[in-house]
Each structure stands twice: as C-alpha cells, then as structure tokens.
Amino acid sequence: MLDYLFPILSFIDLFSDWKPAISFILTSLIVIIVLPLYLKERKMDSFFIIGSIY
C-alpha cells in the first residue's frame, strides 16, 4: 500500500504552493484512479492464494 501512497504524497507536495482546493481536487482524482487498481491487485493476490491452496 505504501508504494501507492508515496507518489500521491509527493504529488501533494508539488502542489502545496498552489491553492489547497486545486491540490485537493487533483489528489482526490488520483486516489479515485489508484484505489481501484490497488483493490484489483489485492483481489488477484487473494485469487492466487486460494488457487494455490486447492
């Protein structure tokens, strides 16, 4: 999870000089894009674990 959060945090850092609203919108967009990818990856991992058990 940390490898997903790091680019987001550094991205927030880039826009800290800008208006908070703009950085908030950009950050929320990134989270909306990244979170499903992370969940999809986790789902795949659980499938592999279940598959290796049976």
Image: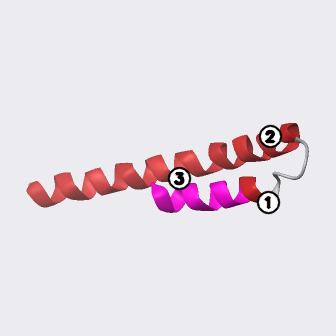
Camera-nearest residue between 26 and 36: 26
CA gap, disc 2 and disc 3:
19 Å
Residue sitting at 45 percent across and 47 percent down? Answer: 39
Q: Position of residue 40 (x, y in %)?
A: 45, 50
Q: Is residue 5 magenta?
A: yes
Residue range in magenta is 1-11
Reading the image, the residue beneath label 2 is 25
Where does the N terminus fall, quadrant-wise?
bottom left
Reading the image, the residue beneath label 1 is 14
Reading the image, the residue beneath label 3 is 37
Task: Please say if the residues under marks 1 and 2 sit with CB atoms less than 8 Å apart.
Answer: no
Q: Magenta residues: mostly which secondary structure?
A: helix
Residue ranking furthest to the right: 19
CA gap, disc 1 and disc 2:
14 Å
Residue ranking furthest to the left: 54
Q: Which of pointers 2 and 3 lies earlier in the amino acid sequence?
A: 2
